[in-house]
Image (cartoon, rainbow, N blue to C red):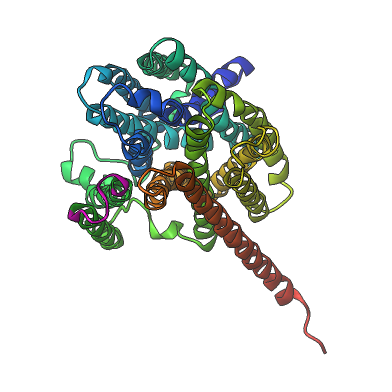
Amino acid sequence: MAKRPESLLHESCFLFVVSMAQFLGQTGLALSIITAHIIGRSWEHVSDGQLSWFAASFSLTNSTFILVAGRLGDLYGHRRLFIAGFFWYGLWSLLAGFSVYSTSTTFFICCRAFQGIGAGLVLPNAVAILGRTYPPGRRKELVFSLFGATAPAGFNVAGVFIALLAQRVWWPWSYWIMAIFCFSLAVAGIFVIPKALDPPPRTESSIKQGNLFDFIERIDIPGALFGITGLALINFAWNQAPIAGWSNPYVYVLLIVGFLSLAAFGIVESKAKFPLIPTSVFTGDLGWTLSCIAAGWASFGIGLYYYYQFMEVIKGDEPLLAVGKWAPAPIMGIIAGLTTAYLLSRVSPSVIMFMAMCGFLIAATLLATAPVDQTYWAQAFVMVLIYPFGMDMSFPAGTILLSNAMPREHQGLAASLIATTINYSISLSLGFAGTIETQLNHHGSDLLRGYRSALYFSVGLAGFGMILTLLFMFVSWRRSRKPARSSTPAAV
């Protein structure tokens, strides 16, 4: 366990720098979701499917590289990977801004994908840094709750400046400023993150210096290749289908190859000496928690994307006004985070997860059913107030559950599982929603019908997550009753 910074000033700077991993992860989404239509005007004949790739490409690589980033952090040190991740993030943010001079969206989408790798390197190692710095207790619960609360702030606070720059100056400036900020955080991390976190303690997971085969075995490169390939191809196929159509052979061929790669990943992991995901970490609580988080955050990803489509395309709002309507979210995120910190020591994680799923379901329903000519204060405002409770109650509960359950050398894995589930579910759900939209919008003549159909799908996902949570609560209740029954003396 690394020593917590002694002075309040040092600890505040440490928490600020580490929390920026979550903040800028959401900013990365905001960079392309809020101003997607403005960015799309930089090239000719950009379809709605290509616009969705601006966000999906970021989430795709972010989610698929997170597991590997966690393992690299466990082996080489979370501090090193955190700093390197911000340098990488900054480099591709810089290049994404210059992609405005390219002739098509291809280079921009590639830059967005490489940005996602940087965010994928940073986030799990940030969570692992906090997990190794703070022992289980109230302070750790508060820190993780505040860390989770930066998600809506990252999207909305940064979103104001992103929209302002896109409308009043030039959209590439948001990427160039992002690059400067990432480089600054990388430098700050060198000074404020305790060096005790780097290199990691000499456990059996440490790599023997100079041994290539030992490196391949301990990093589990075969497992990483099959895992990343499978996740990436499945995600790519679903997000490309709205553009190319399922009648195009390469779409479903890539989908089949993706599933085969995941099957190979399972076989390789079962035989690997140092698997990316050890079988010992798989428990019933882990499966329930990740399933609920996947359903809830997939619903949120669809809701967030189509909120801006609804406001900007259907209602005719400027991006800055659409962001302004989302302004209460950061405040509610802080309230939700503090509420979660208070509840974590008083109720079980399954109860908190149920409350989070209720938040996702209510917010998704309000957005999906909002009439076009209705005032913002009727349903949209209430939706903005409720969504943060879904995000900022599910993330800390799941993270603390896994962080406390896993040994110190697997803190990167604990963070990776949560972060992978969140980001991959967002990216994949956009592909599902895009397919639903294109199939039901009457070839683009009825955009509102397509948007609502996608939003109804998000309602279904949130409802599915709530059902899973109810089952989880029932299983937990049954499990808690067994020891009580076994301890009851037998009747004489």
Is 17 within the magenta? no
Which quadrant of the structure image shows residue 47? top left
Residue 72 visible in this rendered orientation of the protein: no
Left or right: 444 in relation to 246: right
**How many numbered dots are placed on residues in this image?**
0
| Relative height, residue 221 to residue 172 (above, below) | below
Is 246 within the magenta? yes
Q: How far from the left and from the top, in percent, is residue 51? A: 35, 34
Residue 229 visible in this rendered orientation of the protein: yes
Report the magenta residues as a range. 241-249
Q: Residue at x 34, y 20 (%)?
A: 90
Left or right: 161 in relation to 178: right
Which quadrant of the structure image shows residue 465? bottom right
Q: How far from the left and from the top, in percent, is residue 288? A: 53, 59
- Which one is in front, 491 or 313? 313
Q: How far from the left and from the top, in percent, is residue 239? A: 33, 46
Extreme residue in the front direction:
445
Left or right: 127 in relation to 75: right
